[in-house]
Amino acid sequence: MAVHNACDSCNGNGYTPCSCKCKKCDSKGKIKCRNCNNGKVKCAHCSSGKAPCQSCGATGLLVKERLFGSIREDCPVCEGTKRINCTACKGLASLSCSRCHGSGVHTCPLCGGTGRSSQCSKCHGTNRIKCQKCQGTGQLLSMAHDTSYRTWPLERLRFEYEKRQHQVSNLHAQILQIQGTHNQLADERAREYANMETWEQAEQFQIVHGHSEQGYDYRLSQTRNQIQALQNQIKSVEQEMQELENTMNSKWK
């Protein structure tokens, strides 16, 4: 008979998340860039995305000589408006911030993007502390070390078997729920990453979401760990069910 189950307090991981947070970034792992507004800075080469047309000298007209004199026509470049879209900002009146690479945020210098306090006396910056319930083993004793279950009456064996059946069903339901959350996070991460316009933005995305507790990569890792712990717990319970079934079969003979 298996004598251990995955600890229900830490999901078999042997540790629980520490409640410490980086005070500078409020556990987000990133801080707002002070040089820009949401990753954009005002274009220094134009006003409102427009610049004087160089083709016509900002007059909107071009003089063309004809056989019997000259005529004035609208400039074909600016179409007589005297101004054209700024070539530096493509008419947007703003440029991507060079300091934050257009992301609007910087990696927090205090926590290095982890969102955790490196000075925490409990976890020392690891964001996890040893589970007090299982003392870091990830397992709890499930049944007695001896084989006393073999002396149980048939009714007790059936009850224990059915109880574990319900437990396995509940664990499978938890896995489905967590798997749904995992898939949703993965889809959201893929969509956001696909919208990155520059390599600098993509690099900043990887830094932010790879270290922060609020980042996609960290949360995806957490859901994978939770699913693995639940699967280990199912395996342990199913081993107990097999032992109980074998014992019931021996009593029926």
Image: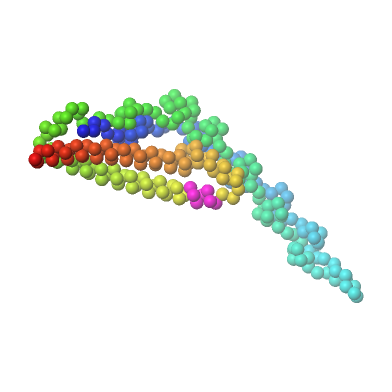
Q: In the depicted view, which residue is nearer to us: 104 or 155?
A: 155
**The residue positioned farthest toward the top in the image shown:** 121
Q: In the depicted view, which residue is nearer to us: 192 or 22?
A: 192
At 63% from the left edge and 40% from the top edge, which residue is drawn? Answer: 99
**The residue positioned farthest toward the front in the image shown:** 253
Q: Position of residue 155 (x, y in %)?
A: 11, 40
**The residue positioned farthest toward the left in the image shown:** 253
The image quadrant where one finds the C terminus is top left
**The residue positioned farthest toward the bottom in the image shown:** 68
Q: Is residue 54 a member of the stretch shown in magenta?
A: no
Q: In which quadrant of the rendered view does residue 104 lie?
A: top right
Taking 226 as reference, is 194 left or right?
A: right
Work out whether 64 lies above or below 123: below
Q: In which quadrant of the rendered view does residue 50 lie?
A: bottom right
Q: Which residues fall within the magenta stretch? A: 189-195
At 66% from the left edge and 49% from the top edge, which residue is drawn? Answer: 95
- Main SS of the magenta part reads helix
At 90% from the left edge and 73% from the top edge, which residue is drawn? Answer: 69
Whether residue 182 is visible to the viewer of this picture, yes or no, is yes
Q: Position of residue 188 (x, y in %)?
A: 47, 49
